[in-house]
Amino acid sequence: MGDSYVLYHDQIIKNGALSVDFEDRGYLFGDGIYEVVFVYDQKPFALNEHFERFIQSAAKLELVLPYDLQTFKELTQQLISKNKVHDGMVYIQMTRGVAPRNHLYERDMQSVVTGFTKSVSLNTIAESQSNGVQTYLTEDIRWLRCDIKSLNLLGNVMAKRKAADFDCQEAIQHRDGTVTEGSSSNVFIVKNGVLQTHPANNLILNGITRQIVLKIADKLQIPVLEESFSVDDLLRADEVFITSTTMEITPVIKLKGASDQTYKIGSLTKQLQKQFKEQIVTSTSAMKS
Ligand SMILES: Cc1ncc(COP(=O)(O)O)c(C=O)c1O
């Protein structure tokens, strides 16, 4: 059985042997960051990109990295191997550390790194990728630093719960009528052959999958607008899809919460999905050789 080992500081230990200090600032304040990396055929996908973002998030919050980038990558790989993950995800988290509860943080704290893996059958994500998902439109109530992949996810989890209550797999959030992103994904629309998504600023997380999709679009010479769009634009789109590490490129077939709208899974979405899959195969086979 896989998934029974976890990462704690720089050690891979048995899951049951890990305990979290209740004075950990991650536990008390959500004071920390994380990354989720997908594993295909035992290889982490886009590992460098994920750890680059991890380091950026750490810098934005003045979190201290306990070891260098190479060690983070090696420990992640060791965790995947130890748990014998064939396909699935790796979660790596770093909190500011342990101290008596006080809003004021010190800058020289010893960060606490933890991580786990979860094996996933690729069939489960394949189904929503071919059939699409239902989404629910809801107000974006989050703070103004959504570019940081922080542990503070209350707005996101509330949006996800609301979506699930309306039988939808994902929430699409808007700020005053401007579509920002999903609760755990980025949102793209297609109108008259042009691909559009919210610009990478403080109002969204610049998803690694989002960045890969934009690179693929560039390679395929698909016109792209990295400009914000309105709920009306979303309602009138020809195609809508969401992207994330765990959902890859997932078509949206329905939007609820406004005037209900249905969408077809369009040719541009399918073309991007195909290229994305090819990129996964290329990257995993490159890591084998
Ligand atoms: C709020 C939010 N936006 C976007 C994404 C997609 O990012 P990525 O493609 O790096 O997984 C996530 C992923 O969890 C997220 O939580």
Image (tube, rainbow, N blue to C red):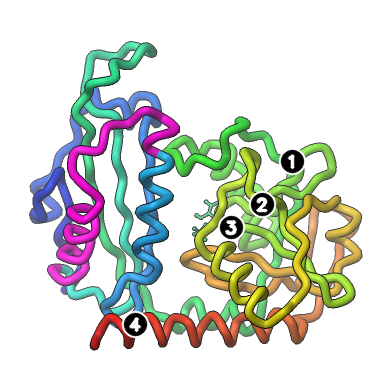
- In this view, the mark in front (4 or 3): 4
Q: Residue 75: image x %, image y %?
A: 17, 58
Q: Residue 220: image x %, image y %?
A: 67, 82
Closer to the camera in the image, 234 or 207: 207
Q: Which residue is mark 3?
A: 185
Which region shows up in magenta? 58-82
Query: Badges 2 and 3: C-beta atoms under 8 Å apart?
Result: yes
Mark seen at residue 282 = none
Mark seen at residue 284 = 4
- In this view, the mark in front (1 or 4): 4
Q: Earlier in the sequence, mark 1 or mark 4?
A: 1
- In this view, the mark in front (2 or 4): 4
Q: Which residue is mark 1?
A: 139
Q: Residue 127: image x %, image y %?
A: 56, 82
Give the CA distance from mark 2 to mark 3. 6 Å
Q: Does mark 2 have its CB less than 8 Å from ligand 1? A: yes
Q: Does mark 3 have its CB less than 8 Å from ligand 1? A: yes
Query: Badges 1 and 2: C-beta atoms under 8 Å apart?
Result: no
Q: Amino acid at mark 2?
A: Glu
Residue 24 in the image: above or below residue 35: above
- In this view, the mark in front (1 or 3): 3
Give the CA distance from mark 2 to mark 4. 29 Å
